[in-house]
Amino acid sequence: MALSIALLARETGMTRSSYQFERWKPREQSTWVFRVFKKHNKELLRMYTAFETSRRLTYSNLGKTAKWDDLASKHFLFVRPLGFDQFDNMRDWSDAFNDLENWLNLNALVAISSNLETYMATVIPLALSSDVGTLYGTSRKIDGIQILKYGHAKAFDFDQLVISCTKGDWSSRLAAYERYFGRSPKYFSTNISALERIRNLRNNVAHSFGRDIEASRDQHQVKTLPIERLSRDGLLSLQKVTWQMAKAIDVHLHQFHIGEYQALAFYHRLYPSLRHDLHPAMRATELKKRIGDFGATAAGKEYCKGLVNYYESL
């Protein structure tokens, strides 16, 4: 077993060291932007799991001693004076707790939706910066790294293009995405209804306290409207949609429009601090070290040499 592990490690190292740089063939499995998206997603699910386990434990313990007609103060110590007066009994408290869970689900969806939109607002201009020719039907004919290297400080301004992909209903976002990149991932075009449900719920929670926006703005109403309902399973189902959506977009843009642009841009930022009187191989060695320290997947010598030669020959 130890020998097998050693051989695998050696083979992996050899593969990494011999991997050749190719501008439009990404070495890593995903963009760095998607890695950030995953970390935010993991952070939220970690907090949500903490709530879910505490909910189960609370009800498990209450089930041993509490009765529905008990006063809440019999089982809970209220920090705020007379706080228990908000609840008629334990059943009333349980109803409030269920409302809290629903509110948490709704606001978790807001965070999940925002994470997806932030991802898209970051990866789309990255792809356009890399492959600006795609806007004119000439994908990969203009290398964005050359513009980054020789253009002025703010050579790219894709703000309005990004807005059209991240604002409005999802049908219009899809149309904009396909207009810029020629096509879209199948998952994008076949899940518009689920994405619209996420968008509508997100807007209702963010702008009208979890109620329908238009109905909430009725000037001749004194009663509150019923709040939107979202179960745990419903939340996780919609979270899966955002995950698959981001993953599909990442594969598409990474493979066809970004390639090695992120690593090249990393070297572009690093280049001014390097010694230019040395052989390029020395700068490749420094790139190998720095990109590993940065947190990207470890790169081999041949790859770094190829990247340095590509950038410096532009």
Image (spheres, rainbow, N blue to C red):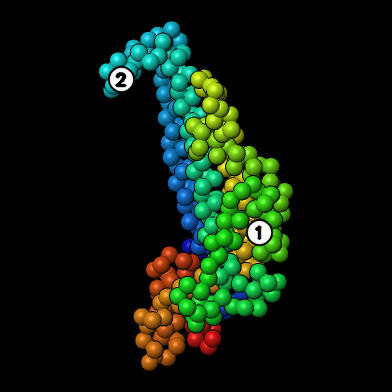
Q: Is residue 237 left or right of residue 148?
A: right
Residue at screen point 43% across, 26% down: 57
Could you say whether the residue bearing mark 1 is in a helix, strand or loop?
A: helix
In this orientation, which residue lies closer to the viewer: 62 or 253?
253
Q: In this view, does 199 lie to the left or right of 104?
A: right
Question: Residue 288 at what x, y percent from top left?
Answer: 44, 76
Q: Which mark is residue 102?
A: none
- Amino acid carrying label 1: it is Tyr
Vertical comparison of 214 with 157: above or below: above
- The reply to whether residue 193 is in sight is yes
Q: In which quarter of the image is the C terminus?
A: bottom right
Q: Do the residues labelled 1 and 2 touch (CB within 8 Å)?
A: no
Residue at screen point 71% across, 51% down: 189
Vertical comparison of 117 with 7: above or below: above
Crowding at label 1, few (<14), some or many (≥20) Cα neighbours within 10 Å? many
Residue at screen point 59% across, 61% down: 161
- The reply to whether residue 10 is in sight is no
Could you say whether the residue bearing mark 2 is in a helix, strand or loop?
A: loop
- The residue to which callout 1 is attached is 177
Q: How many labels does the image show?
A: 2
Question: Residue 204 at what x, y percent from top left?
Answer: 55, 35
Judge depth for marks 1 and 2 and give the one in front.
Answer: 1
Crowding at label 2, few (<14), some or many (≥20) Cα neighbours within 10 Å? few
- The residue to which callout 2 is attached is 78
Mark 1 or 2 closer to N-term? 2
- State the image quarter where residue 294 is shown: bottom left
In this orientation, which residue lies closer to the viewer: 119 or 211?
211
Question: Residue 241 at what x, y percent from top left?
Answer: 62, 45
- State the image quarter where residue 250 is shown: bottom right
